[in-house]
Each structure stands twice: as C-alpha cells, then as structure tokens.
Amino acid sequence: MTTDNLDKPRVGFLWETLYGWHDTGSGGDEPSDPARGLQPVNRHFSAPGPKRRLNEIIQVSDLRQHLTHLQATPATEEQILRAHTKRHYDYIVSQSELPKGGDCGDGGSPFGHNALQIAQLSAGGAITAVNSVLDGEVDRAYALINPPGHHAERDRSLGFCLFNNSSVAVADALERPEVSKVAIIDWDVHHGNGTQDIWWEDPRVLTVSIHQDRNFPVDSGFIEERGAGEGLGANFNIPLPPGAGNEVYLAAIKESVIPALEEFQPDLIVVATGYDAAMMDPLGRMMVTTEGYREMTDLMIGAAKRLCAGKLVFIQEGGYCQYYVPFCGLATMESLTERSAGFDDAYASIVDGQIRTEITAEQREHLDRAREAYFSEASTGLGEVAS
Ligand SMILES: [Zn+2]
C-alpha cells in the first residue's frame, strides 16, 4: 500500500451481473399494443442499460483498484417483510412465477419470469452495503443495484420498483442496537412516495425527498405531507419546479436538508441517488450536471462526518439517460473516493453552456415554502406529541 492510501476513505462498491438481467420488456412505458398504436421500442425506460454502463465506466476507470468490491446476498423474505406487507410480497412472488413474467402493479413496470430472484438480490445489495459501513469494513459505500426501490410502498409497488431496497436495508439496520435513527435523503427526480409511506408513522427514520413537483407520482410529494402519529415531522418533501439545476439543488441541501439532519441527529445517512434530475434525462425536466452531483455528494459526506462518524451509504434509484448516467455516477464516486477517475465529463460541451448560476424567483419561492413548512414551529409536531 502506498502512503497515498492512508488518508483516503475506504469505499465499498457493489454491482451484480444479474442486475443487468432485469427484463423490462419491449414497451416504452406501457407494453407495446397495436390496438393503441404503441410500437415496441425494444428498450423500456427502466431497462438496465444506464446502470450497467455506470458499472462498466467505474470498472475501466482509475477508481476500480481503490474500491472494496462488495458481494450481495439475496434479501430473505423475513428481511423484506420488515418494510412490506406479506400481501405485497406474495403479489410479487406470484407475478414473478408467471411464465412470461408480470408487472409491479401499475401496468407500466413489467418484469421477467423469476424477477423475484433479481429483486431479492437488489434489496440484498442494499443490506450488504449498509452492513459494510456499520461493521466498519469500509468508511462509505455505494450500492449500484437494480431494479430500483423508492416507489415501492409498504403494500404495493409502482414506477419500475418491486421492493423498497433502501427501506429494507434501513429496517435491517434498525435491528442493530447501535442504530436507533436513520435518515434517508432521496434526490431521485421523482418523489420517494414508497419510502415516505413505509416510514410515515415511524419517528426512527427521517425521510427527505427532493423532486420535480408533480412529476411522478403526480398526486404525492407535497410539502404538507409530513408524517403522522409519532412520525409526524419526520417526513420532508422539497418539490421543485421544472428547470432546477445545480444551484437550486445545492441550496435545497444547504438550507433545508442539512439543518433537518442536524436536528434529527441520525446514526447513519442513506442517500437514495437517482440521476434522473440530470440535464439529459428523458423522464425528468431538471438540469443537474456531473458537477452538481459531485457537490451534492460532498455536502452529504460533510454532514455524515459531523453527525454520524461519517457513516454514509448511497443506494441506486433511477436514471434513464444512456449517455449521461455513467458520468453522473462517476462524479459521485469521485467525490466518495476523494480520487480522480481519469475521465472528464464527455458531455460537458453539451451541458455546461446551459448551466444557470442564479436562482429564479419561482425556484426561490419553492425552496422557501418547503423549508418554512418543515421548520415552522406550528408544524413540527413535537407539541402535539407532548400533549
Ligand atoms: Zn426517478
């Protein structure tokens, strides 16, 4: 080992070949259907390509030799049932057993025969990554898993997700005596409705979602959704208008997410990272660039160091641009490893000229309204618990 390694963090990285075998059929969103004029495109939005390509750019980069390569084991039924109902688990099992596979439940999220095996391995990869950090095997970890999870609610799933991987991993972590509170920061461009639902009444998990206002699901992710019962005040939605880029996301994290983390004092921070808030994504209308993801990750590292001995785990959610996802993920990994990957953003010439450094009045209004709704004294929920 060179002395160069002594002051660098140990970073775990996890990808399994089977994640690239998750079969989402040949439709664009819904299955192809000649009666409706829906042609097969041979590549569903949620086909594994962008994530497989992210793994491959990491494997050919200068980062590979510095990573601790983690190996996933499938999540057990018992582990999955800590975040989901038996009814939902059995639904996925029965759909997975169909000869040609099934659907998550919304009609737009097909999966192949025996997809259960890959879904268990995806949730299991999230558990492995969390354990690697909690056990001290590594300082930080990145679970590049597939299929994604954050739209999967306790009793149903939608939006390309089968099981809520980060929630399964967090529920598993909460079984450990040294873990009593966990924060999940979700910056996928879509609302983390599933994560919100699973922890809605649970004060042990702070769930934060920064997302494009009314993108998906269109009927959730509003600032008024703050949890209930003992969990009131432990759910924080930051919906942003289309067009928000690095400056808006960084402001949301500095002004809202980090103060919420400081108030909550987690034992572990999980980032549910999607790259569909990136400028080139087909399913979002945001403008984050590789530099944005790098700086957002830097901020999470700083918060984890201050609040929970650096314990930080990134868990993959969405990201649908074949071109740009690998570079966004690579920038995130450069931040986590504190090393250079040896590649510049190959699309900088396309995206950098579009970067805006000012925050518009509409964006400022969204940022302020979300922050005020969460932090206002009347809405903290603490008084209601006390009475
Ligand atoms: Zn998404």
Image (cartoon, helix red, strand yellow):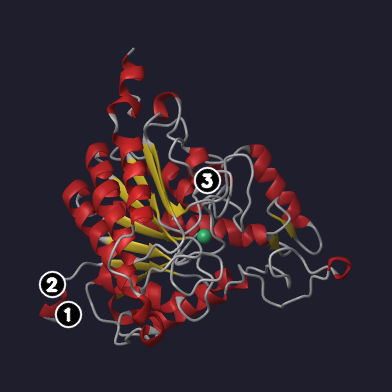
Identify the residue position indicated by label 2 in the image.
6
In the picture shown, does residue 308 fall above or below 313? Answer: above
Contact (Cβ within 8 Å) of mark 2 with mark 1: yes
Q: Nearer the viewer, mark 2 or mark 1?
A: 2
Judge from the rendering whether residue 198 lies leftward or rightward of residue 114; answer left or right: left
Q: Nearer the viewer, mark 2 or mark 3?
A: 3
Instruction: Specify the quadrant of the image occupied by residue 179.
Output: top left
Question: At 56% across and 50% down in the image, what residue appears?
Answer: 151
Secondary structure state at the residue bearing disc 3: helix
**How far across and down, in percent of the image, does residue 266 sit?**
28, 42
In the picture shown, does residue 169 fall above or below 63? Answer: above
First along the sequence among labels 1 and 3: 1
Q: Is residue 371 visible?
A: yes
First along the sequence among labels 2 and 1: 1
**How far across and down, in percent of the image, does residue 28 sit?**
69, 70
Identify the residue position indicated by label 1 in the image.
1
Q: How many marks?
A: 3
Question: At 49% across and 60% down in the image, what residue appears?
Answer: 317
Q: Pick out the residue farthest to the top.
A: 387
Secondary structure state at the residue bearing disc 2: loop
Identify the residue position indicated by label 3 in the image.
193
Q: Amino acid at mark 3?
A: Asn
Q: Amino acid at mark 2?
A: Leu
The residues bearing labels 2 and 3 have C-alpha atoms spaced at a distance of 41 Å
Q: Is residue 180 visible?
A: no
